[in-house]
Amino acid sequence: MLLGEYRHNVDTKGRVSVPSKFREDLGQSFVVTKGLDNCLYLYSKSEWQTFENKLKELPITNQDARSFVRFFFAGAAECEVDKQGRINIPQNLREYANIQKDVVIVGVSTRVEIWSSDNWNKYTNSDSLDVSKIASQMSNLGI
């Protein structure tokens, strides 16, 4: 299971160290793609396959479904971990997530998220992140 929060720096070549605990679950090669909330999602190959299969089930006749699938696939890239435990985040993905130097890497059960520190701070300090309110709405989802 992927969990925890880590702070790292991106070097001038766009490389960032992936925490060793995450590398154990993600493997030597995995998929990075645009995520919701202006962050990046990292999936192990097996989790990506599961996610891909769910996306394939969406009806191609539905415009929102096509846009949703396009969003994840067009922004996806395969990453390999180098000998120092780093990955190179493609420029287009760094731009999408506003990643420049400081990042927060977060484990979220089946995926890892990479956030620019600025975006993460805005997200965690946002008035819309009222955990009590969100928790009360989770009963609609069976939680």
Image: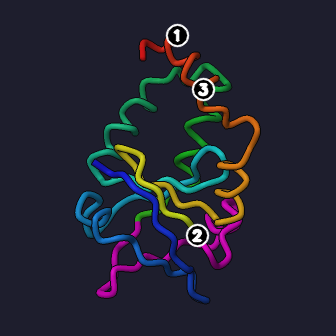
**Closer to the camera, 68 or 17?**
17
Specify the segment rendered in magenta.
Answer: 79-102
Q: How many marks?
A: 3
Mark 3 residue type? Ser
Say which residue appears at 71% left-offset and 64% top-offset: 118
SS state under label 2: strand
Q: Tell me the CA gap for discs 1 and 3.
A: 14 Å
Mark 2 residue type? Val
Q: Circle 1 is placed at which residue position?
A: 140
**Residue 52, image x and y in percent?**
40, 39
Say which residue appears at 42% left-offset and 24% top-offset: 57
What mark, if any, has residue 23 been given in the picture? none
Is the residue 42 above or below the residue 108 in the image? below
Graded by Cα atoms within 10 Å as few (under 14), some (14 to 19) or many (20 or more), the crowding at tag 1 reads few
Q: Circle 3 is placed at which residue position?
A: 132
Q: Circle 2 is placed at which residue position?
A: 103
Would you say 23 lies left or right of 40 here?
Answer: left
**Residue 24, image x and y in percent?**
23, 64
Q: Earlier in the sequence, mark 2 or mark 1?
A: 2
